[in-house]
């Protein structure tokens, strides 16, 4: 397992390098200039700014300069927030997005797994149809529509939660609920399918014949194997929650990584955009690795060691 983890971690380097190079050429190939929004900027000032950030040099030279700084852990200076570095911006924004994402992931698992288990237990009944209908709605409704409805109901009609910002634990409820809605649906559907297969196994029938209670059959015997596909889904789901927070953070005015990613595109903040892309790429690879490790821990039949 240690050798497998080491190999996967070493693969991070070329992948992140590819992300950095592709992102660099994509943002630099976009029309306009990061200084084009400046009002009444003189030609002399524009030349000085381009020289300060190295934009007066050929693109290959600029890329080489950026990669050298990146190798030292320096993501550069923001072109929009000129008194701040990209490291500083991401360092403040990333914990906010991670906190929101973890809250949404907990909601997804806490609601999705029991919903899928009950749906499998009551397969082809009204409970099953109702649960899967709710899951379908959760997948189908866009996050900005759901966010608007939640704000309307729980901030104006029944004022229980704040509409925007990060003032305390209550301010996390609506954004996390919005973010978790489609993933509750995915988790419940995956759990249902897995549990239907698990509940038809002989050892489940044996447990029932020995007089095990329904709760014991479902959650002690059945869920132990039925949860494996959900664990496999955790990596992509967590990455999807973190990257999907872009829209939610914008709607609820949450100062996370997603809203900074949007601002970097709007203001042509090249270095901030590349930095956000690198962080999202690193998160995706890390979470997929954690998911694979958990998969091997839960199912002892899975071995990542190479055969000699």
Image (cartoon, rainbow, N blue to C red):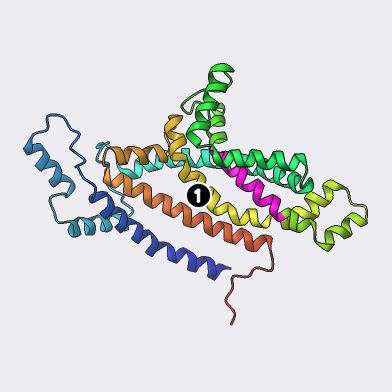
- The location of residue 246, given as percent across then percent down, is 43, 39
- The location of residue 142, given as percent across then percent down, is 50, 37
Asked if 280 appears above or below 145 in the picture, the reply is below
Identify the residue at image location x=75%, y=49%: 120
Q: Tell me the magenta residue range.
A: 179-194
Determine if residue 167 is in view. yes
Give the camera-side residue of 112 and 142: 142
- Please check the rendered image and state whether residue 181 is part of the magenta-colored stretch, yes or no: yes
What residue is pinned by disc 1? 239
> The N terminus is located in which quarter?
bottom right
Asked if 212 appears above or below 158 in the picture, the reply is below
The residue carrying pointer 1 sits among few (fewer than 14), some (14 to 19) or many (20 or more) residues within 10 Å by Cα, namely many
In the orientation shown, which residue stands out farthest toward the right?
Answer: 210
- The location of residue 108, given as percent across then percent down, is 61, 42
Give the camera-side residue of 12 and 268: 268
Identify the residue at image location x=54%, y=37%: 141
Identify the residue at image location x=57%, y=39%: 180
């Amino acid at each position: 397992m240690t050798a497998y983890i080491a190999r996967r971690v070493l693969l991070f380097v070329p992948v992140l390098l590819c992300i950095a190079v592709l992102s660099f050429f994509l943002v630099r190939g976009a029309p306009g200039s990061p200084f084009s929004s400046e009002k009444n900027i003189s030609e002399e000032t524009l030349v000085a700014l381009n020289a300060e950030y190295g934009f007066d040099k050929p693109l290959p030279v600029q890329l080489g300069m950026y990669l050298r700084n990146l190798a030292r852990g320096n993501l550069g200076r923001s072109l929009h927030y000129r008194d701040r570095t990209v490291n500083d911006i991401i360092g403040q924004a990333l914990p906010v997005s991670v906190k929101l994402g973890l809250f949404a992931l907990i909601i997804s698992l806490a609601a999705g797994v029991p919903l899928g288990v009950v749906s499998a237990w009551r397969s082809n009944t009204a409970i099953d149809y109702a649960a899967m209908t709710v899951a379908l709605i959760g997948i189908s409704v866009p996050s900005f529509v759901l966010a608007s409805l939640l704000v309307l109901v729980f901030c104006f009609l029944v004022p229980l939660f704040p509409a925007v910002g990060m003032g305390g634990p209550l301010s996390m409820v609506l954004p996390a609920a919005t973010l978790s809605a489609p993933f509750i649906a995915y988790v419940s559907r995956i759990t249902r399918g897995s549990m239907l297969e698990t509940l038809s196994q002989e050892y489940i029938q044996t447990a029932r014949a020995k007089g095990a209670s329904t709760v014991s059959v479902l959650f002690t015997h059945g869920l132990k194997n039925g949860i494996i596909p959900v664990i496999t889904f955790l990596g992509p789901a967590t990455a999807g929650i973190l990257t999907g927070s872009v829209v939610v953070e914008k709607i609820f005015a949450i100062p996370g990584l997603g809203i900074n990613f949007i601002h970097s595109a709007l203001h042509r903040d090249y270095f901030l955009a590349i930095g956000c892309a690198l962080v999202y790429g690193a998160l995706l690879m890390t979470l997929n690795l954690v998911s694979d490790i958990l998969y091997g821990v839960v199912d002892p039949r899975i071995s990542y060691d190479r055969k000699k």
